[in-house]
Image: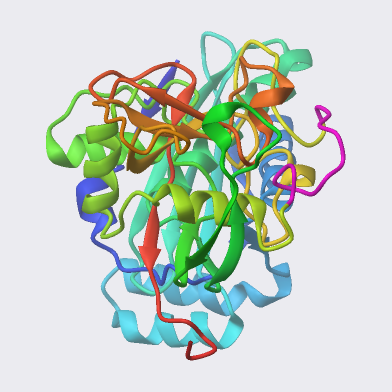
Amino acid sequence: MKSFLCVGLAAVLAYDVPASADKYHVGVTNFTFTGYAAAAARSAKTVIESRLAASSRFDIVERSRLSDILEEVAFQQSGVTETSSAALLGQQANIDLLLFGDAARLPEGGYTVTMRVVDVATGRVLHAQQEMLPHNPSIHKRVLEHFARGFLAVALALYPAEMVFMEGGRFTMGRNDGYPEEGPAQEVKVASFYLDRTEVSRAAFAAFAEETGRSFDGDEAPELPATGVSWQQAHDYCDWAERRLPTEVEWEYAARGSAGRLYAWGNEEPDHRRARFATAEPVSVDELRGGTSPDGVYHLSGNVSEWVEDGWRPRHDAEMTSEYRVIRGGAFSQGIATLRTTARAFHNPVKGASHIGFRCARTAVSRSGN
């Protein structure tokens, strides 16, 4: 059974973290334990460090850099010192977050493992979570893997999603040798913009839902893409995050690039190391790194289809109008043809679907001054 201990999402989301930060530097402390829970503590620490190392958003700092920070944060949380001193130490040591863990043996058998993330600059507990481990140690790793994935997904949801800068330019949108709705091919000019590196996760959407009084259960598989979300709900989320849905032109430019890539990663045929397709369920928003675009954007081909801003109309029939909205990118439940960077589809905007998610964009000024 899983329980959230002190999340306070609405307050935490007010904490301002630069969207341009590449990684969050995390110090993992030695996990404490009581009773005969030493093995559970060691297992939990090993699993969480493994997940941190595999993530594109976290960087584990050397343990030798933690002692002064730990002492200062302890003083800070007790009210002995001001927050500015810890912030300065964190900046000097290049540490953003501290991760603490504790394991305890239960009288009736089994264990509890508790983890919490503390922001070094403010001393606040950003997220804490507890997991029950069964008495049988042979399945601890599997349970802890699931726990760690969810814990890190929720921790990341407390920060703005990382955005990738897309330098404006020209590219050929669409193709003439595909399905009719993909054509005709035409040269398009795109202004510079930012695009979320990953699809919006269930944890991130749950944070939005909690603050805005909406119903959405993000506890189950929080690291997966947020699906079952209508176009308007996706639009509202991006607006709440001070972003917007990407236009269809921006989305295809990010996926295809000026080189006219057939798939987000290039022209090599899809496989399950690059993309999630023809299967029963999606994967975490930051998995399958081999299928990222050259700019490092995940899942522009596969995993879940994505809402964009535009209303649907086939480009070869410019007179046609429709109440539907465009979705791009193909999905885990669909075939290879939907993974092409020019593939287009549509969906009823008032209904979500299990195969449709989204990501956000933001307008930017070109770095080259164009």
Residue at 79%, 14% in the rendered image: 138
Count of labels in the image: 0
Q: Answer above or below: position of 278 versus 173.
A: above
Q: Position of residue 202 (x, y in %)?
A: 42, 32
Left-right relation of 273 to 214:
right
Q: Position of residue 326 (x, y in %)?
A: 40, 33
Residue 336 image-quadrant placement? top right
Residue at 71%, 34% in the rendered image: 177
Q: Position of residue 319 (x, y in %)?
A: 31, 35
For residue 160: magenta? no
Q: Answer above or below: position of 202 versus 362.
A: above
Question: By what rule are the colours in the image chosen?
Answer: rainbow
User: Relative to the observer, which residue lies in front, 154 or 95?
Assistant: 154
Q: In the picture, which quadrant includes the N terminus?
A: top left
Q: Which residues are magenta?
A: 261-272
Residue 116, can we see it? yes
The chief SS type of the magenta part is loop
Q: Looking at this rendering, what residue extends furthest in the left direction?
A: 213
Residue 186 image-quadrant placement? bottom right
